[in-house]
Image (spheres, rainbow, N blue to C red):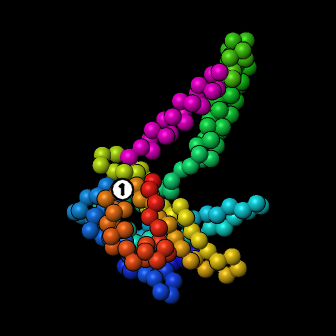
Amino acid sequence: MIDLPLGKLKFNDDVDFSFPTSLCCNCGNRTGLTLVEQDTRRTTYMVAGGTEITFKLPLPFCEECLPSSKRRPKNFVHRALGFLLSFGVAALALIIAGEAVFDSPAIAKYLVPFSLLFATCTTGAWIAVGRPRGTQTSYFQPVRIPKLKREFVSGIVTAIGFSFTNREYARAFAKENSEAIAKRVVNVART
């Protein structure tokens, strides 16, 4: 784990960068801000395993967006596993209900379509709950690390890329860290 202190961050020997603290990194609100260490993880997968680095990024959040600092983003694999789990639960429930309660051949005939319908509805509801509310740009962590360049043997981080769900915050970050971006040590990607 890389434990980065609040304030300016020292990245390598000649480059430091910082995060703007004048607006919420999620919704852009400029009042009632709290500086929080967002526990941000970057996992790199290899053939038979992978590595994970944790960064504690000092980011400003308003009171409404504060819970989003702890919610890790979900990707396609998470959603696919949720769909498969709900499909399995629905199929098992229909098999048990068909055998024990109804003794109905209709349940057996439509087991797969009923299970698919249930899994689709459950996964859709799960995704809908994860939608941003109000002026938020993300229900999950608004600052992510999509790129990380490391030396192969030592593992020292040589470049990092950030993505921001809030465009205004991304512009403020790019303006504040123009020197590090010009040296190609820090990169700002679009989310």
Which amino acid does the dot numbered 1 rest on?
Asn
Q: Is residue 100 left or right of residue 176?
A: right
Task: Work out which residue is located at the far top of the displayed protein and give it.
Answer: 105
Residue 70 visible? no
Q: Nearer the viewer, residue 159 or 78?
A: 159
Q: Position of residue 9 (x, y in %)?
A: 43, 79
Residue in view at x 76 percent, y 60 percent: 47
User: 108 above or below 19?
Assistant: above
Give the percent coordinates (x, y) of residue 78. Answer: 60, 47
Q: Which residue is mark 1?
A: 166
Q: Which residues are magenta?
A: 113-132
Residue 122 shown in magenta: yes
Residue 16 in sight in this render: yes
Image quarter hosting the C terminus: bottom left
Q: Residue 6 in magenta? A: no
Query: In the rendered view, does 21 fall on the left or right side of 101?
Result: left
**Quadrant position of residue 129:** top left
Quarter of the rendering containing residue 94:
top right
**Quadrant of the rendering where the N terminus is positioned:** bottom right
